[in-house]
Every structure is written in structure tokens, then in C-alpha cells.
Amino acid sequence: MKHKIFTLFVFGCILTRVVAADNSFNEGDFTFTILSETTVSIKGNNVNLSGELIIPSRVEHDGKSYEVVKIVSSAFSEYNKITSVYIPASINAIGGQCFYECTKLTKIEFAPLCSITTTNNQPFYGCINLTTIYLPSQLSIFYSSAFEGCK
């Protein structure tokens, strides 16, 4: 009996690991993590991204279309070649320090219909050259520390 339980435990751990590994996929310079049948989160996978960063609102994978709804914590932290960021209306959550110390970042533009309901700790902390921010009127929650360490 102990042997069967141990075998089931090991099989369950292996199965869990396989499912977790299939939960994320890479597309270009981004890694997406599946959150639901129709939504994903995003983070960068190429620290050498430069110039304008446009966060996609949708991504296709294995014949399915997903809406990009979240930028995860530290997603683009210390990506020092990014100069501007465009955040689409599909994004409703921004993780902590997602653009932490992106020192060349000068402009952030949120889509006009963007309705972010969640921001975590200091998403734009240390973006020392940030001078232009276009915020949407529907912005629900943005903590005062969101732009700490910026000009």
C-alpha cells in the first residue's frame, strides 16, 4: 500500500511539473503565461530590447487567441534600452517594479480606454529620465509610489 501511495505521489509531482511547464510560451521578445482559457500575462525575455516597447493586446498560440491582461512583477526590470512604452487597453493589472530602473525610459502611454484596476509596488521606480506620461481617465488604482525615483 505504501508503495502505491508513493508511486501516485511521484506521478502526481511529475504530472504537475509537466502541466506547469506548458503554462508558459515564448513569442518573439516576450514570455506569456496562460492565466485562463482566454487570458495571459506578459514579461520580457530579451533584456536587449531597445527603443519603443509596444505591449501587445492579443497573442496567438497553438491556434488559440489570448488577451494580454497583466504585466507581471519585474517583467521589464532594468531593460535599460527601452525609451518608450505603450500599454494597451487590455491590460488591467501591472505588477510591482515591472519597469524598475529602466533608466532610458522617457515616455509611458496608456491606451485611452485602459482601465487598470491593480498596480503593485513601484512599477516605474527609478525611471530617472521619465518626462512624459499619458494616463487614461479610467485609471482606478495607482499608488503614489508608482513613479518614485522619477524626475
Image: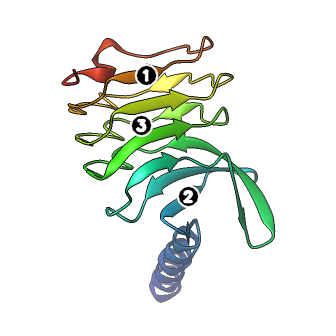
Q: Which residue is mark 2?
A: 33
Q: Position of residue 45 (x, y in %)?
A: 41, 64
Residue 47 appears left or right of 2:
left
Q: Position of residue 26 (x, y in %)?
A: 54, 70
Q: Which residue is mark 1?
A: 133
The residue at 65%/22% (across/down) is 112
Mark 3 surroundings within 10 Å by alpha-carbon count, few (fewer than 14), some (14 through 19), many (20 or more): some
Q: Position of residue 12 (x, y in %)?
A: 54, 75
Which of the two discs, 3 and 1, sits closer to the camera?
A: 1
> The residue under label 2 is which amino acid type?
Thr
Q: Are marks 2 and 1 in contact (CB under 8 Å)?
A: no
Q: Which residue is mark 3?
A: 95
> The residue under label 1 is which amino acid type?
Ile
Which of the two discs, 2 and 1, sits closer to the camera?
A: 1
Figure check: 34 above or below 111: below
Q: Secondary structure at mark 2?
A: strand
